[in-house]
Image (tube, rainbow, N blue to C red):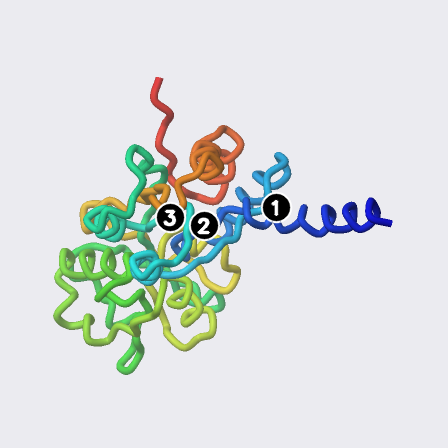
Amino acid sequence: MRAVLLLLLLLLLIPLQARAEALTVFAAASLTDAMREVAGLWAKAGHEAPRLSFGASSTLAHQIEQGAPVNVFASADEKWMDDLARHDLIAPGSRRDLLGNDLVLVVPADHPIHVDIKPGFDLGALLGPDGRLAAGDPAHVPAGIYAEQALRKLGLWQKFGPRIAAAADVRSALLLVERGEAPAGIVYGTDAAVSKSVTVAGAFPEASYDPVTYPFAAIKTGDTQEARAFLAFLSSPAARDIWVRRGFKVERPKP
C-alpha cells in the first residue's frame, strides 16, 4: 500500500517538474505566427512547450522591469532591449539580432490599390476626408515609431500624424484595417502576409526609417541552460526556414 501511494505521489510530481522547466518567452506581436511555429518544432524535438506571450515590445519590456518571470525576450527594435540592458536585466552574452523586417502600407483586400510611396505622395486621397491611418502608437510601439520616422522623412507627418489611429501593437493596427475601421494602415510586411483581409498598397523606402531589427536575449533572472538552448534553436536551420517562409529577413550565420 505504501509503495502504491509513493508511486502515485511520483506521478503527480512529474508534471509539476515538467511545468517548472517550461520556458516563458515574451515576443513582439509581429512574431506571433512564426514564433508559434518555431515553438512547435522545439516541442517536437522533445522539449517542454514554451509559454508564449505576445504584445508591444514596450509593454513586454515594462512587465520584465516590473519583475515578470521571463526566460527569453524578443523585441521588435533595439530601443526596448537597450532599456532592459540599462536596467541590468539582460543575461551577459545572450543578446543577438536575429531578424529584420520591412514597413508597408496596407489597405482592405476588397479595395486594392497601388501607390508609389515617395516624398509628398497623395496619402490624403487614400484616406479620404475623414479616414484615419492605423499604426502602432508612435509614443512607444516600435512599428509606430518606424511609421513616424517614415512619414517625417516623406514630409507627411505634420499633416497626417494627427490622423493616426494609434494602436496598442502592430497586430491591433492590422486589425483596424481588416475590419474596415481604417482605410489604410502601416504595418510590417510579415503582418500583411498573414492576413487575407488586407493587401499591400506599397512599401516604404528603406531609407525613410531605421532598419527594423529584432534583438533576442535571455533575461538574467531566467537565464537557464534551457533558455540558452532555445536561443540557439531560434537560429538553427529548421527555425531559419520558418522565419524566411514567413517573410522575415534573417541574419546569415557567421562562418
Q: Are marks 1 and 3 in contact (CB under 8 Å)?
A: no
Disc assigned to residue 25: 2
User: At label 3, which amino acid type do we have?
Assistant: Phe
Relative placement, left or right, of 122 versus 136 is left
Q: What is the three-letter code of the residue carrying label 1?
A: Ala
What residue is disc 3 on? 73
Counting other residues with Cα less than 10 Å from the Cα at mark 1, is it few (<14), some (14-19), or many (20 or more)? few
Asked whether, in this view, residue 2 is left or right of residue 44, the answer is right
The outermost residue toward the right is 1
Q: Is residue 96 above or below residue 188?
A: above
Residue under the image location 47 percent in, 50 percent down: 24
Tag 2 secondary structure = strand
Percent coordinates x, y for residue 14 in the rendering: 67, 46
Residue 18: give its label. 1
List x then y, in percent, for residue 9.
Answer: 73, 50
Indicate whether 182 appears above or below 231: below
Q: Earlier in the sequence, mark 1 or mark 3?
A: 1
- Left or right of residue 49, residue 73 in this image: left
Given this view, does label 2 or label 1 mark the residue nearer the observer? 1
Q: Earlier in the sequence, mark 2 or mark 1?
A: 1
Query: Which residue corresponds to the image point at 48% horizontal and 44% vertical from the top-left?
Result: 246
- The relative height of residue 172 versus residue 99 in the rendered view (above or below) is below
**Separation of disc 3 and disc 2 at Cα?**
6 Å
Type of amino acid under label 2: Val
Tag 2 and tag 1, C-beta contact below 8 Å: no
